[in-house]
Amino acid sequence: MPPETKPLDFLIITALEEERDAVLAKLPGWRKLDRDGTGAHTYYEAYATTTRGDGAVYRLIVTMLSAMGPLSGAIKAGAVIQRWNPEHVLRT
């Protein structure tokens, strides 16, 4: 399946820039995605290959909150989940 059509397996939302950078440091080959004009969020895409026998590859999107607090977190989570429709969401 071409990368641009592969479903999103994991969406990772971090609260701080340092956390985002730490996550990206563990994901070789990540790339910053161009904005599509529909929102102000910045996204980073990466692929993680497992060591399983089937060599499964997971598609990940990483983003961070633009402001602190539960309301900001809920708004951001809702917006990015609606856009990306991930299988799983992880929040730091």
Image: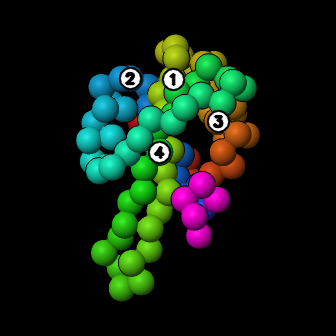
Please say whether residue 90 is visible from this viewpoint: no
Task: Decide if residue 31 is in sight here.
Answer: yes
Q: What crowding class fits label 2: few (fewer than 14 Cα within 10 Å), some (14-19), or many (20 or more)? A: some
Describe the colour scheme in one phrase. Answer: rainbow
Q: Which badge, 4 or 3, is on the more N-terminal residue?
A: 4
In this rendering, position of residue 46 left or right of residue 2 = left
State the separation of the CA atoms marked 2 and 3: 17 Å
Q: Which residue is mark 3?
A: 80
Image quarter for residue 2?
A: bottom right
- Quickly name the residue at label 1: 65
Tell me what residue is drawn at x 28 percent, y 36 percent: 22
Rendered location of residue 62, percent (x, y): 47, 39
The answer to whether residue 8 is above or below residue 81 is below
- Which span is picked out in magenta? 1-5
Estimate the x, y position of residue 79 in percent, counting from the top left: 69, 31
CA gap, disc 4 and disc 3: 13 Å
Label 4 environment density (alpha carbons within 10 Å; few <14, some 14–19, many ≥20)? some
Disc 4 and disc 1 in contact, CB within 8 angstroms: no
Q: From mark 4 to mark 2, how far is it between C-alphas?
A: 18 Å
Secondary structure state at the residue bearing disc 3: helix
Left or right, 58 with reference to 4: left
Identify residue for label 2. Answer: 16
Q: Amino acid at mark 1?
A: Leu
Residue reaching furthest bottom?
Answer: 53
Task: Single out the mark in the foreground, 4 or 1.
Answer: 4
Quarter of the image that includes the N terminus: bottom right
The three-letter code of the residue at mark 3 reads Val
Q: Residues within 10 Å of mark 1 (few under 14, many from 20)?
A: many
Where does label 4 land, which residue?
Answer: 45
